[in-house]
Amino acid sequence: MRSNEAFINAILNNSPIVFGAIDLENEKWIWRSTVTDSGDSFTGYTKAEMEAFEKNEIEIIVHPDDQKRFMNDIDKLKKSSLDEPVESVIRIKRSNESFVWVRVLHKTYEWDCEKKPLKAALVCEDITERVAVQERLKDTLRRLEEISHKNSHEIKAPVESILRIVSLIVRQNNIGTHNKLLIEHLYKSVQKLESIIVSINNLK
Amino acid sequence: MDFNANFIRAILDISPVYIGARDLITDDWIFRSGVHGNVDELTGHTLDELDAHMDDEIEFLIHEDDRKKAYDVFEKVKEPNCDKPVELTCRVLKQDGSWMWTRVIHVVYERDEDKRGTKVAVIAEDVSDQVTIERDLKEVVKRLDEISYQNSHEVRAPVASILGLVDLVLMQQNLTRKEEMLFECLYKSVEKLDSIIKEINTLSS
């Protein structure tokens, strides 16, 4: 397809992905699609802020727990003579101090004559929402699991004990008519309780 | 930035989104990424299969429940002065017969003298995983809500009634020591049950 500025702008301005190119030798950005003269619309940093942390960008914007892993990934990319994509899932800090989860893919597209990687293309996708939904799902499933355990194990013991005691009371010969009525109600309530607990267990 | 061929090839190879351009006059693709050999990577269909359905592409590729939405989007991008991205989330038929949730963004980038779109840039992404996980979460939350409702309403009622009845019995003066012991044991068991139910309520709320 013939290169067309309007088409490229339409793609770059509306894609949910950040596209970029990095100079692997000098560890510098060559270009990224979200950067304009006013700054980076993805991270929120101004041009001046970006220039200030150009030398130690990873230490400043990558979450401390993800830095080592990310540096290893970049090293892998720099040492590989192949053009295999290298993937990293990391948190990066925005100018408002919040962290976003991103999935970054790098692929070398220029080598020197000794096959040493020089430049890599990059795509970066914001996956914060996806990670949050996954975390919520995990947490809800864990809670369901715990409820399931409590309903089928912990609740069982007192319900069985209540049923046993009520049966013992029913077997007493000298219960008055009034008490007999109360105990009948008691027995019905326990049976109702048991059936509800069984129905809750069937929900899971 | 010099968008040289190697760079563009590398970007298209690793991009999770598929990029294309469509001619709105001929309703035909000008370009689309993700085509390897004769196969469209996103759907798995061969280009021959897709070409054979050029005239009924929407009926062939888009789930019948999403077709109206798709037609509306294609009409919208042809309207004069359509200068905002138009988004469509729909199910697309894959070659293996399964449906893939796809999010497609359309952006007009070329217009005629009446300001009607003639060419549109297309950005498509497979969002099936996202849709599945959101649906799973909705289902699990619904189950948790049901349990929460049952625990706090239906389970609490008989427990409260048992506690009340045992209380009534224990208030009587004419119980034998054995009866008193049995009812006290009963009370303790119900109390224990009540505390577990409260724990479950905390977990499910």
Image (cartoon, coloured by chain):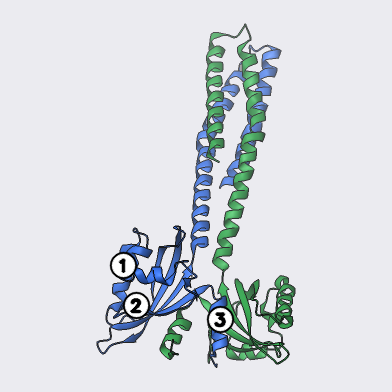
Chain colours: A green, B blue
What SS does tag 3 mark? helix
- Spatial CA span between label 3 and label 1: 31 Å
Q: Earlier in the sequence, mark 2 or mark 3?
A: 3
Q: What is the spatial separation of the Cα atoms under label 2 and label 1, in whole angstroms?
A: 12 Å
* Residue nearest the viewer, comparing A26 with B22: B22
Q: How many marks?
A: 3
Q: Decide: is A52 above or below B34.
A: below
> What residue type is disc 2 on?
Asp
Identify the residue shown where x is 68% and y is 23%: B185
Residue drawn at x 27%, y 82% is B80
Q: Residue B28 — which label?
A: 2
Q: Find the distance from the CA under tag 2 to the CA under tag 3.
A: 24 Å
Where is residue A110 drawn, in percent x and y? 64, 88
Judge whether A75 appears above or below A110 on screen: above
Residue behind mark 3? B11
Reply above or below: A26 against A102. Answer: below
Query: Are dots 2 and 3 in contact, CB under 8 Å?
Result: no
Asked whether residue A44 appears in the rendered view, the answer is: no
Quick check: can you spot residue A35? Answer: yes
Given residues A6 and B199, the one toward you in this image is A6
B99 on left or right of B151? left
Sooner in the amino-acid sequence: mark 3 or mark 1: 3
Q: Amino acid at mark 1?
A: Asp
Say which amino acid is labelled 3: Ile
Residue extending farthest to the left is: B114
Residue B103: percent from left, percent from top:
44, 68
Which quadrant would the N terminus of chain B be assigned to in this image?
Answer: bottom right
* Mark 1 neighbour density, 10 Å: few (under 14) some (14–19) many (20 or more): few
Q: Nearer the viewer, mark 2 or mark 3?
A: 2
Whether labels 2 and 3 belong to a single chain: the reply is yes
> Residue B56's mark?
1
